[in-house]
Amino acid sequence: MGEAINLELLLHRALAPVEPPERLASQLAATLQSITDMAAEELEGWELASMRDPRNWVRPAAALVVGTAAGGALVLLRARQRHRDRPASSIGELRDRAAETAQDFADEARRLLDSR
Amino acid sequence: MIEPTGSAKAQLDAKFSELYKAHLRDVYSYSFYRVGNHHDAEDLTEQTFLQAYRHFERALRESDGRPLRPWLIRIAHNLAANLYRDRARRPQSPLDESAPIAAAHTTEELVAGRDELKRVLEGVELLPDDRREALIMRFALGMDNREIARALGRTDGATKVLIHRAIKQLESLVAMGEAD
């Protein structure tokens, strides 16, 4: 047991912590700082560049188109359902329904724009 | 992943700076005893902190308040393993004899204990990788079993057994060296 304790003491001495060279600390700090700066600049640069590049407009534009199409389809469905419930019997009534549907489109468009 | 905002990023960088200051010596010591020379130890230390910086936010989130030293040492451990794989070799020369021992002891102690310490270091070099690493973490870094277990990805129990076996094997190696 005594030998084991001795060996542990020897291990403590043999494997003493090693001080890093001073220049390593400053070198590493400088590297990390430059990475942080570069990352911030890159992010800013990317944001500006992405808005200038029309290829990056496709996604938001596609989202707008999809959203609008979905809204339009919903209006038509509502109109058809309403018209099935009460069939038109005159030209005047057809005109009223066209006006209702146009109003629905306008409301839907307003709702979509408000939600953006 | 949610990108941190400006002030959150500054806080994160400040925390990383604390971590780096607190554990630079640990990572360097581990690297030195692992690769056996100052040049590679500096490279390994730098790479370890650069990698740690990239994953710091996630590590902080997942650590749940536990110390991050085992995580740092695990990064160094993995990078050192890659270094050996790339070079397909173990350290080419034994540990630089000049630095750690000379730094920690007086001349008289060196003269008296040099042979003994040399035998111990040679024995450590002959141990299987996992046993050698466990001893480096325990004695050079002062890590407890739990920290070593986390760094090596083992259970506390398995780590205790690993260290026990490492010391037993080292005893035999040193005894054999004395007999020669």
Image (cartoon, rainbow, N blue to C red):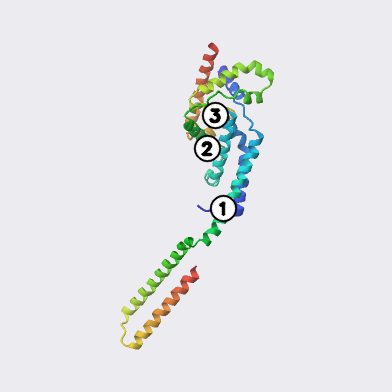
Chain on which label 1 sits: A
User: Disc 1 to disc 2, how far (Cα)?
Assistant: 27 Å
User: Disc 1 to disc 3, how far (Cα)?
Assistant: 35 Å
Chain on which label 2 sits: B
- Same chain for marks 1 and 3? no
Q: Secondary structure at mark 3?
A: helix
Q: Is residue B5 left or right of residue A84?
A: right
The residue positioned farthest toward the top in the image shown: B179
Name the N-terminal-most of marks 3 and 2: 3
Q: Disc 2 designates what residue? A: B75
Q: Is any atom of residue A41 visible in this view?
A: yes
Percent coordinates x, y for residue B38 in the rendering: 60, 30
Q: Amino acid at mark 2?
A: Ile
Q: Which mark is residue B35?
A: 3
Q: Amino acid at mark 1?
A: Glu
Which is nearer the eye, A116 or B155? A116
Percent coordinates x, y for residue A75 in the rendering: 39, 74
- Same chain for marks 1 and 2? no
Q: Disc 1 designates what residue? A: A42
A102 to B163, vertically: above or below: below
1 or 3: mark nearer the eye: 1
Q: Secondary structure at mark 2?
A: helix
Which is nearer the eye, A43 or A8? A43
Hey, which quadrant is residue B46 in on the image? top right
